[in-house]
Amino acid sequence: MVRYVVVGGGIAGVTCVETLSSLCPEEEVLLITASPLIKAITNYKKITKTLEDFDVEERPSISLQSECVNVKVVQKSVDSLNARSHVIKLSDGEEIHYQKLCLCTGGRPKLILDCSPYILGIRDTESVQEFQKRLSTARRIMVLGNGGIATELVYEIEGCEVIWAIKDKSISSTFVDPGAGEFFMAEINKKKEARGEKPSKRLKYTVQDVRTQSTKDSPLGGALGPDWSADLSMTGTQEISHCVTVEKCVEVRRVYTKEEFQESGKWSTDLMGNVDQDCWPIYIELTNDKVYGCDFLVSATGVIPNTSPFLPGNQFSLAEDGGICVDDKMRTSEEDVYAAGDVCTVSWEPAQHWLQMRLWSQARQMGAYSAQCMVADIKGQSISLDFCFEVFAHVTKFFGYKVILLGKFNAQGLGRDYEILLRVTKGSEYVKVVLRNGRMEGAILIGETDLEETFENLILNKTDLTPFKDHLLDPDIDIEDFFD
Ligand code: FAD
């Protein structure tokens, strides 16, 4: 019987194992992961109390064993779980008995069609390499989805026409409001030289040369980490820089193969709206009746939690999004089984200013906290919810701008009961504050605003801002001094 078993070598699983190893150096910790490379966090730094920044490195899974002597890594996939008997079964039939188990198996891209070779998802290094290869011979592609992956792709792709199909009224709406979407729209077709980018100093992802899985149903490698797109060549065959056409408020109605399209009697349009005479491998009909021919489509519409090996024969509560429900101690509904990262969905009553999003910062935080919870349970100690779940905080980069999201940055769950303060300098910064009853509920900070620490404190302290409201975003007032 192994005391602690963790499944998954992504950010959540590796952080969980490292935390277990440091909390109980005398206990055996087993990491089982399908991927030959694990994700290790490096250069971790706290920007504010809740905002964190780090790099992610891909390392051979075995490297974890040399850093944490009580950790053993097994590179296999888990095929099934018998939670009542506390046993997992590996792909080669080996059975492992555990005392505490943590599932950190991440998610897989949600594809609009699973069986078309012209529809790609992006998750791990190998899927990115496949994408790059296909793009290098492409003249036109469609990107479907409005989250972080779609936003980064659209920003990076050159030499290829891109149709960005989104179901919302504004771009990047998973993260930012329509105002910020408009702010970014100005950047969308700017030439690379005009963007004044600095090269990224972070890691370049390598493709796993030891590939053990090849079918669509088998586990993927871990999801990519920060700056995954920055150093990659994403260039098509055309002599053009960025050429993005955004189709708003649409979904995909139907995907046609070349043959199906020829038989359909329909016609497709080019980017100018003229009848397209070219021949394409696939044709995509949108709900606004437009049909575009493309070389391929990238489906970037979120992830489906990787739960399938664990469900048969067990009684896990699942959330609507398919994630395994966890309580405020990261426990699933099966005894001694915990879950962390993209595979889980929190089912505790979240703090006023926190929400779950499938992000690497939350994968790290959940991985560490689930380890603390498992250890506390074994030792019979009580543990309270980690401070990182008090305020949602995320830092990222969109269209070359630093983007910081705090609290209920999009007024999530506030109904109509809030007001917005806004400060925009085109091409430089976008600051939005969400206020309810005079208190700050959340904020979006785009550009080098330097406001994150003060705003985080105002949210955490629930400061009544009614008397200062009119001056809060006044660029001539140093609000840091104001609230000292
Ligand atoms: P994963 O990293 O998916 O790891 C899952 C692990 O489980 C893998 O090692 C896999 O091999 C293993 N596994 C799966 N099934 C089994 C099995 N049956 N047996 C054994 N092992 C198994 N987040 C941000 O915060 N900001 C961003 O800008 C951002 N951009 C992203 C861009 C891309 C292209 C992608 C794909 C994701 C992005 N994310 C971003 C999301 C972020 O990467 C994830 O939320 C995070 O990495 C999830 O970590 P995880 O450990 O839960 O899962």
Image (spheres, rainbow, N blue to C red):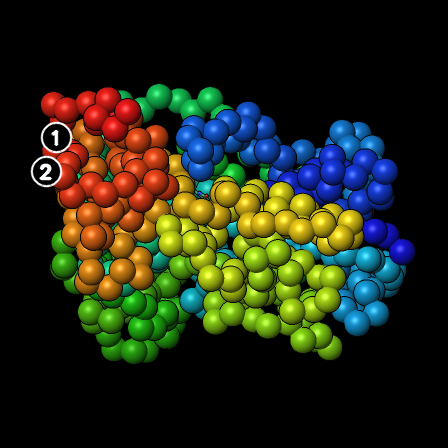
Label 2 and label 1: CA atoms lie apart by: 8 Å
Q: Nearer the viewer, residue 242 or 145?
A: 145
Q: Residue sitting at 67 percent across and 33 percent down?
A: 59
Q: Which mark is residue 474?
A: 1
Is residue 127 in sight in this rendering?
A: no
Residue 403 position in % (x across, y down):
32, 37
Q: Quadrant of residue 328?
A: bottom right
Q: Nearer the viewer, residue 176 or 157?
A: 176
The residue to which callout 2 is attached is 470
65 w.r.t. 391: above or below: above
For the residues bearing labels 2 and 1, Cβ distance under 8 angstroms? yes
Q: Which mark is residue 349?
A: none
Mark 2, other Cα within 10 Å: few <14 / some 14–19 / many ≥20: few
Q: Quadrant of the N terminus?
A: bottom right
Q: Residue sitting at 19 percent across and 23 percent down?
A: 478
320 on left or right of 2: left
SS of the residue at dot 2? Answer: helix
Q: Residue sitting at 58 percent across and 62 percent down?
A: 326
Residue 181 position in % (x across, y down):
21, 47
Give the amino acid type for the residue marked by disc 2 in the picture: Asp
Q: Quadrant of the C terminus?
A: top left
Q: Nearer the viewer, residue 23 or 168?
A: 23
Q: Residue sitting at 48 percent across and 52 percent down?
A: 358
Q: Given this view, does label 2 or label 1 mark the residue nearer the observer?
A: 2
